[in-house]
Image (tube, rainbow, N blue to C red):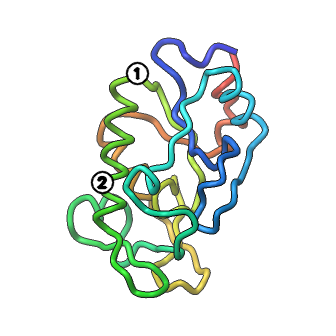
Amino acid sequence: MNVSSPGGPLLVSACLAGFACRYDGAAKPDRDVVALAAEGLALPLCAEIVGGLPIPRPPAEIVGGDGGDVLDGNARVVTRDGEDVTDAFIRGADAVATVAVQVGCPAAVLQERSPSCGVNTIYDGTHSGRRKEGSGVLTAALHRRGIAVVTTGTARERRAWRA
């Protein structure tokens, strides 16, 4: 495996690396991501925790757009209880994306459907379980910095993390 070439480690959602940091206090370990992290080839981070949100926390969804719209100030991130957590999402996404650039992450493997990490799909903002096309706030921040982002399934299909 040669993931750290040409740059640094692969940025990964911390929940995929086995860290219990999801909104519900659980992890969502992916065997390949866990192995990469164990070998020191992945940098597991959670933008929501970096942004100051607790574990566990109420589920949140993007209302009025997607992650790019949140970064542009045209959409908000709101919990099921109605609390606006937009600032924490932006703060965390910006910090994680900045670190990814600083350490030379060539790409990121993130958790689909998350309001932070969704790559192609996020929940629609109604807290009803419905999904829509769009990316999360961290994914948008990474794209704006030129870092490619894929899901675990896409990475496996492309064998993106195997040399």
Which mark is drawn over residue 91?
2
Q: Residues within 10 Å of mark 2 (few under 14, many from 20)?
A: some
x, y percentage for residue 110? 56, 46
Residue at numbered disc 1: 104
x, y percentage for residue 91? 30, 54
The answer to whether 105 is drawn above or below residue 80 in the figure is above
In the image, taking residue 44 as reference, residue 67 lies left or right, namely left
The answer to whether 75 is drawn above or below residue 7 in the figure is below
Number of numbered tags placed on the structure image: 2
The residue drawn where x is 67% and y is 41% is 17
The residue drawn where x is 75% and y is 34% is 32
Q: What is the CA distance from the residue labelled 2 to the residue labelled 1?
A: 20 Å
In the image shown, does 104 or 85 lie closer to the viewer? 85
Q: Amino acid at mark 2?
A: Arg
Determine whether the residue tagged by mark 2 lies in a helix, strand or loop: helix
Q: Amino acid at mark 1?
A: Gly
In the image shown, does 129 or 86 lie closer to the viewer? 86
